[in-house]
Amino acid sequence: MNNDFCQKFIFEDANVRGELVRLNNSYQEVISKASYPPPVKKLLGELMCASVLLSATLKFDGSLTIHARSNGAIPLVVAECRSHQLVRATAHMNEKSLQSPELINNHDLQALLQDGKLAVHIQPKNGQQYQGIIPLEHNSLSACLEDYFSRSEQLPTKLIFSSEGDYTSGLLIQSLPTPADKEPVKQQSRWDHLTQLIQNAHPSEVLALPIERLLTRTFPSETLRIFDKKEISFDCTCTRERTLSALSAMDRSELKSLLEKKSVIVVDCQFCSTRYKFANTDISHLVSQPAHSSPKRTH
Ligand SMILES: [Zn+2]
């Protein structure tokens, strides 16, 4: 049974939208790929939920990726949500740093992503891509995203993430632009009231309570309209061709030394662990070709 879904709702008499996401099967698929320690597991869950919540407003086919790179204990962590609610995620770890007394069981985002950069990348199937930098100025992903929405998008947002075991969940409310016929002051006071109320949502309720009960308990006396659930699944886009293309983008001296050492080049997809094997003789011609990423305008 697939327990993974997202579900939108709106407040009938406030210009505010909301969404709940819950992931179990897809989260399990991601965290079972490596022995991630608790802080990495939690961050992967939060990023997966965030990628679903952020992609909910996109009106086109494509993908939304949130990724962080750092010089710290987690050099790379990435979560992607594609159209039709297909998700995948992965993290690279510096296991020694994660075992250090300062970081063991430390969930502080800035400590885990030291000197890091957090960004959202939107790639429509057709059309121009967009990249936004999410300032890493807070110690939780929810606070960083709230800041990003209010500063870059002018959309005040509140987020609660919750993870336990194989379950991860996110609850979002977002104030929409004030329509021309509405008073901004009134909208602000409604928003302030709802942000007070969402603080009362207990993480265990966000994780497991049926949505109707969760919303009634969190926002009593608010009239809400809840839309149908949308199913979410784990899915990876890797193919043999894409893996070959990644190999052809490798630094030529690195590729050459790899080919000198091995008769079969094995590449495991970091998202789904699918193993791709290339015979040395199948790819040796790449060495004499320019790397994919090198500028083609020299031709
Ligand atoms: Zn894959």
Image (cartoon, rainbow, N blue to C red):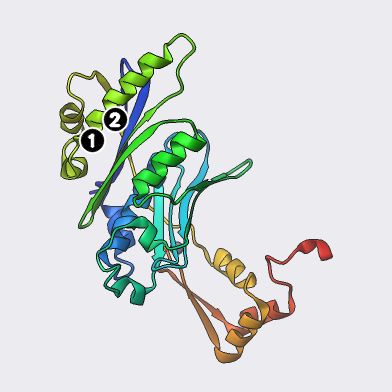
Front-most of residues 15 and 51: 15
Q: Is residue 210 above or below residue 15?
A: below
The quarter of the picture where residue 200 lies is top left
> How far from the left and from the top, in percent, is residue 256?
64, 84
> How far from the left and from the top, in percent, is residue 183?
42, 11
Tag of residue 195: 2
> How far from the left and from the top, in percent, is residue 162?
24, 48
> Which residue is the extreme one toward the right?
299
Tag of residue 214: none
In which quadrant of the rendered image does the C terminus lie?
A: bottom right
The reply to whether residue 110 is in sight is yes
Type of amino acid under label 1? Gln
Tell me which residue sits at (29%, 57%) in the image. 42
Q: Is residue 161 above or below residue 259?
A: above
Type of amino acid under label 2? Thr
- How many badges with numbers are in the image? 2
Kindly tell me whether mark 2's CB lies below 8 Å from ligand 1: no
Whether label 2 touches label 1, CB < 8 Å = yes
Q: Which structural element holds mark 1?
A: loop
Q: Is residue 237 above or below residue 144?
A: below
Tell me which residue sits at (26%, 68%) in the image. 104
From mark 2 to mark 1, how far is it between C-alphas?
Answer: 7 Å
Kindly tell me whether mark 1's CB lies below 8 Å from ligand 1: no
Q: Residues within 10 Å of mark 1 (few under 14, many from 20)?
A: few
> Which residue is the extreme one toward the bottom?
261
Ligand 1 located in image quadrant? bottom left
Q: Which structural element holds mark 2?
A: helix
Tell me which residue sits at (30%, 30%) in the image. 228
> How far from the left and from the top, in percent, is residue 226?
28, 26
> To which residue does mark 1 refer?
199
Tell me which residue sits at (20%, 57%) in the image. 165
The reply to whether residue 233 is in sight is no
